Amino acid sequence: MSKVLSEAAILARRAELIAQLFFQEIGASFASVPSADIGYDFVVGFDNGQGGMNFSVVEVKSTERPQPRTYALSLALFKRLVFTNVPSMLLVVVDVKQNRLYCGWPDRQELAKHEGAEKIRVPITEVDEAQKRVGRERLRGTATPPKLR
């Protein structure tokens, strides 16, 4: 017997596939879906150029409406993204019919600015070639090289 998916489930899956293609395009060594529900859509790994691997967790959101310069996250999701020992990236897939991607990097400092709020707005930027380069550098850990002692 076949399982019929809702339109929302189909759009969410399309967003995840677009995200996987994005990670492949920017040079991820892997993008895997966690086998347990850990609260993230993907764990991605990038060769850091020093013989190691840098990992990030990713939350993918889909919508069919163009987004403003920010994306509202629930306080619980925001905290899950920023209070982890693994860097987090919010990837918003906007208008999945047109394959437009926006990404944002949640920052703990935003909590103080939104004290008492149930939603926190994360700044997002449309992904173009320059943003792909920035994302690749940030995910590989080459945007700010570590200081050697």
Image (cartoon, grey):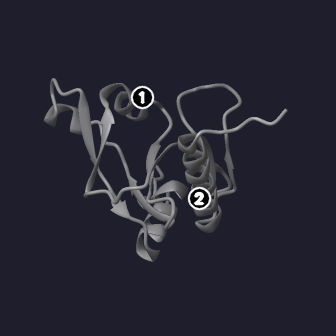
Q: Which residue lies furthest to the bottom in this view?
A: 129
Residue 73 located left or right of residue 21: left
15 relative to 34, above or below: below
Q: Between tags 1 and 2, which lies in front? A: 2
Label 1 close to label 2 by CB (< 8 Å): no
- The answer to whether any part of residue 7 appears in the image is yes
Q: Which labelled disc corresponds to residue 110?
A: none
125 relative to 120, above or below: below
Residue 21 located left or right of residue 87: right
Q: Quadrant of the N terminus?
A: top right
Crowdedness near tag 2: few (<14), some (14–19) or many (≥20) residues, C-alpha within 10 Å? some
Residue 62 in picture, x, y percent from top left: 47, 49
Q: What element carries label 1?
A: helix
Q: Mark 1 points at which residue?
A: 80
Residue 106 located left or right of residue 129: left
- Looking at the picture, tell me which residue is in the foreground, 17 or 145: 17
Residue 140 in picture, x, y percent from top left: 55, 57
Mark 1 / mark 2, whichever is N-terminal: 2
The quarter of the displayed image where residue 126 is located: bottom left
Residue 63 in picture, x, y percent from top left: 43, 51
Q: Which labelled disc corresponds to residue 18?
A: 2
Crowdedness near tag 1: few (<14), some (14–19) or many (≥20) residues, C-alpha within 10 Å? some
- The answer to whether any part of residue 109 appears in the image is no
Real-space Cα separation, disc 1 to disc 2, in angstroms: 23 Å
Inspect the image, locate mark 1, and give the three-letter code of the amino acid beneath it.
Arg
